[in-house]
Image (tube, grey):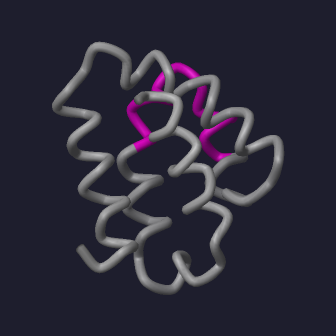
Amino acid sequence: MVEALINATVASLRRPENRENGITSAILKFLQPAFAEHKEEFEQLRADPGDADSSRLVHLRLDGYLTGEPDRIEELEDILDREDGV
């Protein structure tokens, strides 16, 4: 489940329309604590969220951040659901 959520997050970050509708900003705000010890990586992600290196970083940092954390999972799902208008 976590892997599918990470893949959905990466896909959302790659969609240009999400930069305009606030989804990218919401995802980045959610992700920031996962990068607390890796601020340079977060700045790279913020600069180009759709980049392949950024996608790799999301996979790397988000797995541990979400695993065993149902509240975080629910929060991210809520953000991604807004993309679909749910």
Q: Is residue 44 left or right of residue 3?
A: right
Q: In the image, is residue 42 part of the stretch drawn in magenta? A: yes
Q: Where 68 sits versus 60, above or below?
A: above
Q: Is residue 41 left or right of residue 61?
A: right
**Which residue lies at the image location 20% right of the left edge and 26% below the top edge?**
70
Q: Where 66 sits versus 24, above or below?
A: above
Q: Where 43 sits versus 67, above or below?
A: below
Residue 36's spot in the image, x, y percent? Answer: 46, 26
**Which residue lies at the image location 41% right of the left edge and 76% below the top edge?**
22
Q: Where 62 sits versus 49, above or below?
A: above
Q: Which residues are magenta?
A: 31-43
Please tell me in which quadrant of the rendered image residue 68 appears.
Answer: top left
Q: Nearer the viewer, residue 39 or 6?
A: 6
**Which residue lies at the image location 55% right of the left edge and 62% below the top edge?**
12
**Which residue lies at the image location 24% right of the left edge and 56% below the top edge?**
78
Could you tell me which quadrant the C terminus lies in?
A: bottom left
Principal secondary structure, stretch drawn in magenta: helix
Q: Is residue 58 left or right of residue 56?
A: left
Residue 31's spot in the image, x, y percent? Answer: 44, 41
